[in-house]
Amino acid sequence: MALGAAGLGVQAQEGKVSGWLEVKGRKTALTHVCALAETDRLERGDKEIVAVLLSTVPVPDELRKPGSDLAMWAGEEARAGRIDGIILMIDPATKVWSRGQRLSKEHGLTFYSHTSTSAEGRVLRFEPAPAGAAELAGKVSMTEPMRGMDENDGPWRLEAEFRTPVVQQEAVTARLTGAAALNSPQYKAALAFNAACQKKDLEAVKRSMDANSQDMLAKMIEQMGREQTLTMLAAMGEDSMTLKTVEVTVRGPKAEVKLMKSTGNERNETVMTVALENGVWKISR
């Protein structure tokens, strides 16, 4: 990884941050930072991205480890009014910050992005500072405010400096393609989930999920209702069942199952995460 050859242990210590996030003229001090390396799902291959959460409260110890769904936790906490802040997605190779997710009580997570072919044209600026192995440091700023999803969500801007350890991904223990991927327990776990979703079989959906994912499903049902949740899952399952080419990347107790289909010059793909729970592979957050 471009941030340094040395990996961190299972859990990283918290870094330091100073700065603010301003929304509609109201500034909020950012006091905590946590960074996790993960596979960039918006890029092909195994390109890595670093998710940096700048926030008003610390990230729990159990989430500062490889494979944690930092964004999901932050979004849920934001909706509950317990956290404010922003997630920066920074390319560890180029040191470019071009997108991320902002936390808000109204929306939980709001996606934002700005790309430019030149450094001078970038609205989102990251000026890296010298950093040690498996560490990221620098200053983030914006040349102009960005708008949110609605008038309650912006305009907003950010200015902060931080230094933080980066929690590394688990090392790849296997890469499976072709028949090996199709016959893998990881792919079969994803297939079982998609089939259950397509059939709107709620109990089968639950059985295909690990405990954390079941908790998330329960919250979705509480917020959206049972029928609307099942309808959304059915559409997702039906779409995923059309993707036949499979690649499986195993990282110890977790794996990424990539489902793909190419039509002409277009390529559709989705990545599903599965994890071992009591010796059985299941859909994971």
Image (tube, rainbow, N blue to C red):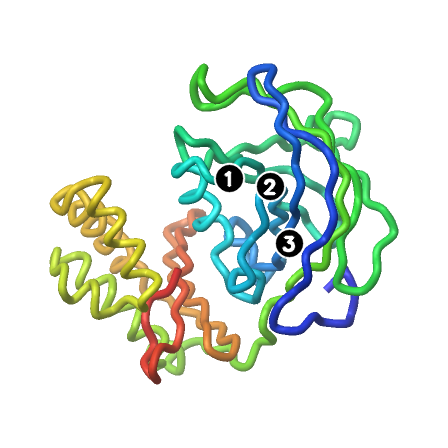
Q: What's the distance in space between the residues labelled 2 and 3, CA to CA?
A: 11 Å
Give 257 or 268, whichever is nearer the viewer. 257
Residue 35's label in the rendered image is 3
As helix, strand or loop, the secondary structure at mark 1 comes to loop
Residue 64: quadrant of the picture? bottom right
Q: Earlier in the sequence, mark 2 or mark 3?
A: 3
Disc 1 vs disc 2: Cβ atoms closer than 8 Å?
yes
Whether residue 38 sits left or right of residue 166 in the image: it is left
As helix, strand or loop, the secondary structure at mark 3 comes to strand
Q: Which residue is mark 2?
A: 55
Q: Earlier in the sequence, mark 1 or mark 2?
A: 2
Whether residue 148 sits left or right of residue 26 in the image: it is left
Q: What's the distance in space between the residues labelled 1 and 3, CA to CA?
A: 16 Å
Look at the image and tell me in which quarter the N terminus lies.
Answer: bottom right
Q: What's the distance in space between the residues labelled 1 and 2, CA to CA?
A: 7 Å
Query: Can you say whether 263 is above or below 180 in the image?
Result: above
Q: Which residue is mark 1?
A: 83
Q: Position of residue 56 (x, y in %)?
A: 59, 39
Residue at the spot 44% in from the left edge and 18% down from the top edge: 152
> How many numbered tags mark residues here?
3
Q: Position of residue 174 (x, y in %)?
A: 52, 81
Look at the image and tell me in which quarter the C terminus lies.
Answer: bottom left
Residue at the spot 62% in from the left edge and 68% down from the top edge: 11
Whether residue 164 sits left or right of residue 147 in the image: it is right
Q: Position of residue 13 (x, y in %)?
A: 68, 62
- The amino acid type, in three-letter code, at marker 2 is Ser
